Amino acid sequence: MASQTRALEAPVTAARPSASLWSDAFSRLRRNKLAMVGLGLVILLLLAAIVGPFIAPYPYDQQDIKAVLANGGEPLPPRSEGHVLGTDSLGRDLLSRLLDGARISVTVALVVQIVVLLIGVPVGAIAGWFAGRADNILMRITDIMYAFPDLLFIIILSVTFRETPIGQAMDGLLLVFVAIGLTSWVTVARLVRGQLLSLKETEFVEAARAVGVSDRNIVTRHLLPNGISPVIVAVTLGIPAAILAEATLAYIGIGVQAPRASWGSLVADGYKYIRSYPHLVFFPALFIALALASFTFLGDGLRDALDPKLKGKQ
Amino acid sequence: MISYIGRRVLWILPVLFVVSVLTFALMHAAPGGPWDREKKVPAATLAALNAKYGLDEPIYIQYVNWATKMLVLDLGPSFKYRDRTVNEIVASGIWTTVQLGIMAFTLAVVIGIPLGVLGALGHNKWPDYLTTSISIIGIATPTFVLAIMLVIIFSLWLGWFPTGGWKGPEYWVLPTIALAGFSIAQIARYTRASMLEVTRKDYIRTALSKGVGNRAVVRRHMIRNALIPVVTILGPILAFMVTGSFIIETFFSVPGIGRYYVTAIEQRDYGVIMAMTVLYAAVVAVLNLVVDVLYAYIDPRIRVS
């Protein structure tokens, strides 16, 4: 083992450019093909949601009655004149409705995760920081939320408040978003709590406290930034769960109100014509699948990229 | 251990209490009542109906009435199916729902775990790609889409299985697969990740280097250790299969209890809603408990501490 004693030709630190946690994680993410495919699809979905209504050939509720009548009152198949993906039985352009559905799915993703963060982070932070009794009470509350059958709770909430102003807001969608958020914050709260409990004992926090940094600043400046990566992963992986929940509810007729349609209600409507016009089910189902897969890939990639246990391996 | 289990069992009661209070309050906060019909019911009839079912009492009295009956397992009358009690409705469908849930759960475990093990053992080779593809498809396909696909392929095209009903084993196949699909993918993904994690462990290298055969290492060291974290997701999965089966039950006309749930909420059938929510919450709570105990039992490291 003579090589061990040879003189260093260059300073050891130059072997690898120093990298912060984030740029390091990002370069790992970029090497993950599946995650990049996911990221690409997510960006496409976001674009569809933002510019969709402007590039859609028709408004989502415009009926091309003439074309449908000319077809004997039946939906138009894909590649019909003026309707790339065909229409439903009322002559509404499927592509335009799918693009509007993208907007719904992206809004679900955003609003639900905002609700989750707004509830989950403070609850977890308070429980983790103060420990003791506050921790006990808050964790018992999360236990109760865990036992609540999610989908059923969302259905009860949606049906209960359907006639109220909040139930009517955003074509009936806001209520569903909030209901999904109310059942999904527990995971984030538990993660934040766990992170805080373990970080609290670390030396740099001890040091910060020794020099007299206030509780609030320790939490916001030291603990949250250091404990945030599992939360980012949980939030990303919570997005497909929220999209799935919304699609499922729309499929059974809860949430979005006609004439607007989410991908789930498009599947439900199209199922009536499944024998002769499978495209009415195929395309919305495909869009749901792509949305679910893309966020799952991205979330998995983020988890692998941010997991410090993997650092240095590979 | 016993005192731990005891504490956890006792903790289920307050959970069920809070769940039932919340559901009760929510239901009654909703505008509309069980007697809303297309045709307006005369005020006198309405008052008589409300009085008969105790709906004219203050809400907390109504809750106490419901809860005292609940304690002796009397779930009260159904407002929608006037000739049946909620007990009869639950009794008529619960075993079908449980049967469907257990069949789907068994299918998910029997396919999901070997698939995950296979994928990890053939890491970055074709078994891995097979496992990964199946998990991706499973995770990207909502239950209701999978149900539609199964019916198109196996009922309409091939004609192998009926599209709905529950008259014999051939009726069980499609609902079971549809309900299990998502969980097969979840279990396979989880098992694969857990196996890969174990592969890197020192004790595996030790076992291999002291000459233990490949087969024995996989069976005795890897799979055993890899399955410990997998157990933690089995509880939520079984709970999902029992409580989330209402979409499958409605789609395939399975006579379980799940299909009553949505109509009961729409129609303000208070008794049915309360019974099912509390039942489902109990199932979830008990399964969570079983998983935690099982987890401690199979992992000696936790048992000791």
Image: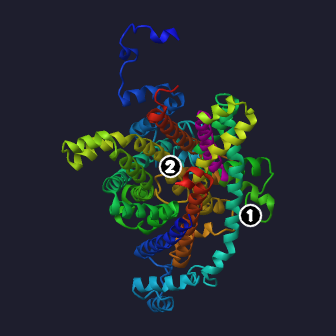
Instruction: Give residue B249's mark.
Output: none
- Asked whether residue B189 is drawn in magenta, I would say yes
- Estimate how packed mark 1 is, as few (under 14), some (14 to 19) or many (20 or more) residues with alpha carbons within 10 Å: some
Q: What residue sits 63% from the left and 69% below the top?
A: B257
Q: Which quadrant of the figure has residue B85?
A: bottom right
Q: By what rule are the colours in the image chosen?
A: rainbow
Which of labels 1 and 2 is toward the front?
2
Depth check: give the residue in front, B244 or B192: B192
Depth check: give the residue in front, B199 or A68: B199
* Magenta-colored span: B180-201
* Magenta residues, dominant SS class: helix
Query: Mark 2 highlights which residue?
Result: A241
Residue A75, can we see it? no
Which chain is indicated by disc 2?
A
Q: Amino acid at mark 1?
A: Gly
Residue B84, can we see it? yes
Query: Mark 1 highlights which residue?
Result: B165
- Estimate how packed mark 2 is, as few (under 14), some (14 to 19) or many (20 or more) residues with alpha carbons within 10 Å: some
Q: Amino acid at mark 2?
A: Ala
Is residue A229 shown above or below B159? above
Q: Position of residue B100 (x, y in %)?
A: 70, 61
Q: What residue sits 33% from the left and 52% below the top?
A: A125
Q: Which quadrant of the figure has residue B240?
A: bottom right
